[in-house]
């Protein structure tokens, strides 16, 4: 065990550092202007999810009377809550400055965001009519003064906290000023950004909050008031699912009940407009029972800035990233049988550089092929109108046996997966609801086909979800293969879902929770042995997050033995690279750019016989010990070379790569090498393959 004062970075602090990298994108003037606004939205959305999950978890540790030092990298939970709040306040302040700068730049492009005080006479009629026709009918307004209890505020919904100062009655000058407080919920079903009629070359946009502010007189016309003010507030609630033990309920019923309960779970963050009156703020905090362990964040005029992810394009393609056309895979035509192609050779799909349609084509072909007997697939997150689900239903209608393992506890997609589960079940799909105590996070599919009176298997293993919507913005690998050894073991994984007491052995696959950690430790040990024997030894890994302290320690051990280690970690990284005597042979970078980096790739030198794996698992305790994950070895030399090439392209990035260090400063990697923006270079790599 390495002994070092600063051995790990706390995962929550590292996560906030990752979100700072997202914020950097919104400040980067080389990023198109509207895309910068959208990165601000991503930053805000990420922060909402962080408080729902991670902050809420640390808060529960405090409330349980525990320090949490063993799981928090040596920091106490109470100190960590304070540190998180301090960092978030600084980041929020920075984000408001960035937003202000972007708005000024938008004005140079004839795009103006106006508030209720800047409405022109010609815009007035449009705004009043829009309010009457679209906003007023769905507006939820609550007068607070006379209520016995405070209304239950929705998680991350935005509210205008309204204060009315009523006029004194004539002749009653000595009477105390009467105040009325109210809440207006900002409707979610209406676009947050209302595009006003264009005036010449100028585009005008008003945020829905300000449109409502402009119409406060109409909303509160029954009160005789001398002034009215409205300031934004929102709360974030604990997103943990509390499962009951009622044996009479089905698993779907239990998840549904837990999702419903989440709506009234404890608040963990309260954000308010810092210009709100102290009397209004004190009234709200008292009524809402805001506790010391809650994070109270003074913010700007507008909350729920995640809505900036949907900022209107206004037809200004020059202010957005160019849309890329996903490429075909070399050697595979748009027509003809994919199953036949896979029977000849493994191939790799890398979205969004290459089209996701190969997965849909593969499933649709299996649905219609008279020789296909069964389809088995895992589902974690599906698109809203999923062609994957449609293909599986089509297969059932054609007499195939279709088995879907659907993860009902996929965070924030529980309700969507419940609805898909009910749909698939009603169409005759056999559903499996996972393994007690484990989430099923693997991305696998197995097709069984009768050929020459024998069962021949085909399938694919992916690093990401089978979701055509996210495949346009997430980078992920999918291996299509007919390797019988791999596919027989995929069948064992599906058997495990139904007979969980039976633990299978695997020669090819790396499967959590039983084997992943130990297999990777053995692969690292092999590199340590090679380094000590004077042989070339290296490890190259690309993941989303790296939080397992045991695996961090293992890489520290490898570094001290002389193994050269390159890490590309998009998000959380608890390892500290480049520290003499601990990690001096480890380099680590993070690439944050146009697409969200999502693959998990593991490369081991193996004394010249390089071993390469792709997997659904990050090196996090949850992925290693508490989820069903599947990693697959790459045996095809062409596919292996493709993975080595694309890793190398990412590693050479010196435009969007940030360097991990003990400073935690998100410094951009700077060197004198040829400029490489890896996501753009990866697309060019596949374009060149097609033309070669």
Image (cartoon, helix red, strand yellow):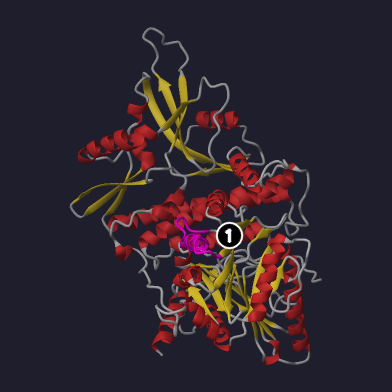
Q: Is residue 224 above or below residue 138?
A: above
Residue 649 is at least partly visible in this image: no
- SS label for mark 1: loop
Image quadrant assignment for residue 543: bottom right
Image quadrant containing the C terminus: bottom left
Find residue 327 and report its horizontal and vertical position in percent: 41, 77
Residue shown at 53% from the left, 53% from the top: 420
Q: Nearer the viewer, residue 464 or 557?
A: 464
Name the side, left or right, on which 397 lies relative to 195.
right
Residue 434 is at least partly visible in this image: yes
Image quadrant assignment for residue 571: bottom right
Find residue 484 and report its horizontal and vertical position in percent: 64, 80
Q: Number of callouts in the render?
A: 1
Q: Nearer the viewer, residue 643 or 64?
A: 643
Find residue 338 and report its horizontal and vertical position in percent: 48, 78
Image quadrant containing the N terminus: bottom right
Name the side, left or right, on which 510 lies relative to 229.
right
Badge 1, how many Cα within 10 Å: few under 14, some, many 20+?
A: many
Residue shown at 59% from the left, 86% from the top: 636
Residue shown at 47% from the left, 66% from the top: 471
Within the magenta stretch, is there residue 61? no
Q: Nearer the viewer, residue 188 or 574?
A: 188
* Residue projecting furthest to the front: 453
Residue shown at 51% from the left, 40% from the top: 234
Q: Is residue 41 above or below residue 2?
A: above
Name the side, left or right, on which 593 lies relative to 479.
left
- Residue at image mark 1: 380
Find residue 284 and report its horizontal and vertical position in percent: 54, 31
Q: Which residues are magenta?
A: 382-400
* Residue projecting furthest to the top: 171
């Amino acid at each position: 065990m390495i002994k070092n004062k600063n051995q790990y970075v706390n995962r929550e602090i590292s996560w906030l550092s990752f979100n700072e990298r997202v914020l950097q994108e919104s400040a980067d003037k080389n990023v198109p202007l509207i895309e910068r606004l959208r990165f601000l939205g991503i930053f805000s959305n990420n922060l909402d999810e962080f408080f729902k999950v991670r902050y809420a978890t640390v808060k529960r540790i405090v409330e349980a009377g525990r320090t949490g030092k063993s799981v928090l990298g040596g920091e106490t939970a109470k100190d960590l809550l304070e540190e998180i709040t301090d960092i978030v306040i600084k980041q929020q302040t920075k984000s408001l400055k960035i937003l202000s700068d972007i708005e000024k730049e938008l004005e140079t492009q004839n795009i103006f965001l106006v508030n209720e005080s800047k409405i022109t006479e010609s815009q007035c009629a449009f705004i009043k009519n829009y309010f009457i026709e679209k906003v007023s009918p769905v507006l939820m307004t609550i007068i607070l003064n006379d209520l016995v209890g405070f209304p239950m505020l929705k998680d991350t919904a935005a509210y205008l906290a309204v204060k009315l100062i009523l006029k004194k009655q004539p002749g009653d000058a000595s009477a105390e000023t009467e105040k009325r407080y109210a809440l207006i919920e900002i409707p979610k079903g209406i676009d947050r950004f209302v595009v006003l009629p264009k005036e010449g070359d100028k585009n005008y946009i008003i945020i829905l909050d300000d449109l409502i502010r402009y119409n406060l007189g109409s909303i509160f016309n029954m009160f005789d008031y001398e002034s009215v003010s409205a300031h934004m507030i929102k709360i974030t609630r604990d997103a943990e699912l509390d499962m009951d033990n009622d044996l009479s309920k089905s698993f779907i019923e239990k998840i549904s009940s837990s999702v419903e309960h989440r709506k009234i779970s404890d608040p963990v963050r309260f954000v308010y407009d810092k210009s709100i009156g102290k009397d209004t703020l004190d009234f709200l905090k008292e009524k809402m029972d805001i506790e010391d362990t809650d994070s109270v964040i003074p913010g700007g005029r507008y909350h729920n800035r995640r809505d900036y992810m949907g900022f209107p394009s206004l037809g200004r393609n020059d202010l957005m990233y160019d849309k890329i056309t996903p490429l075909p895979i070399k050697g595979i035509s748009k027509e003809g049988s994919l199953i036949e192609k896979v029977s000849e050779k493994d191939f790799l799909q890398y979205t969004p550089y290459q089209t996701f349609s190969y997965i849909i084509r593969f499933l649709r072909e299996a649905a219609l092929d008279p020789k296909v007997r069964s389809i088995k697939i895992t589902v974690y997150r599906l698109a809203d109108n999923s062609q994957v689900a449609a293909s599986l239903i089509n297969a059932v209608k054609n007499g195939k046996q279709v088995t879907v393992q659907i993860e009902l506890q996929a965070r924030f997609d529980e309700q969507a997966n419940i609805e898909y589960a009910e749909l698939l079940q009603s169409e005759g799909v056999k559903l499996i609801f996972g393994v007690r105590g484990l989430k099923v996070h693997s991305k696998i599919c197995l097709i069984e086909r009768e050929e020459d009176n024998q069962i021949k298997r085909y399938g694919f293993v992916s690093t990401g979800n089978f979701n055509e919507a996210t495949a346009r913005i997430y980078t992920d690998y999918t291996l299509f293969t007919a390797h019988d050894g791999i596919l027989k073991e995929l069948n064992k994984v599906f058997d495990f879902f139904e007979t969980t007491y039976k633990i299978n052995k695997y020669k090819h696959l790396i499967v959590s929770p039983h084997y992943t950690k130990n297999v990777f430790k053995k692969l690292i040990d092999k590199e340590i042995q090679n380094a000590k024997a004077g042989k070339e030894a290296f490890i190259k890994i690309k993941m989303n997050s790296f939080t397992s302290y045991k695996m961090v320690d293992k890489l520290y051990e490898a570094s001290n033995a002389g193994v050269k280690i390159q890490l590309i970690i998009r998000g959380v990284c608890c390892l500290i690279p480049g520290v003499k005597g601990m990690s001096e042979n480890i380099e680590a970078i993070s690439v944050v750019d146009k697409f969200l980096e999502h693959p998990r790739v593991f490369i081991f030198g193996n004394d010249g016989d390089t071993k390469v794996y792709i997997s659904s698992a990050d090196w996090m305790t949850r992925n290693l010990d508490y989820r069903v994950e599947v990693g697959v070895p790459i045996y095809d030399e062409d596919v292996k070379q493709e993975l080595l090439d694309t890793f190398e392209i990412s590693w050479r990035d010196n435009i969007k790569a940030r360097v991990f260090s003990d400073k935690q400063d998100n410094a951009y990697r700077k060197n004198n090498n040829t400029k490489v923006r890896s996501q753009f270079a990866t697309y060019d790599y596949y374009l060149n393959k097609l033309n070669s």
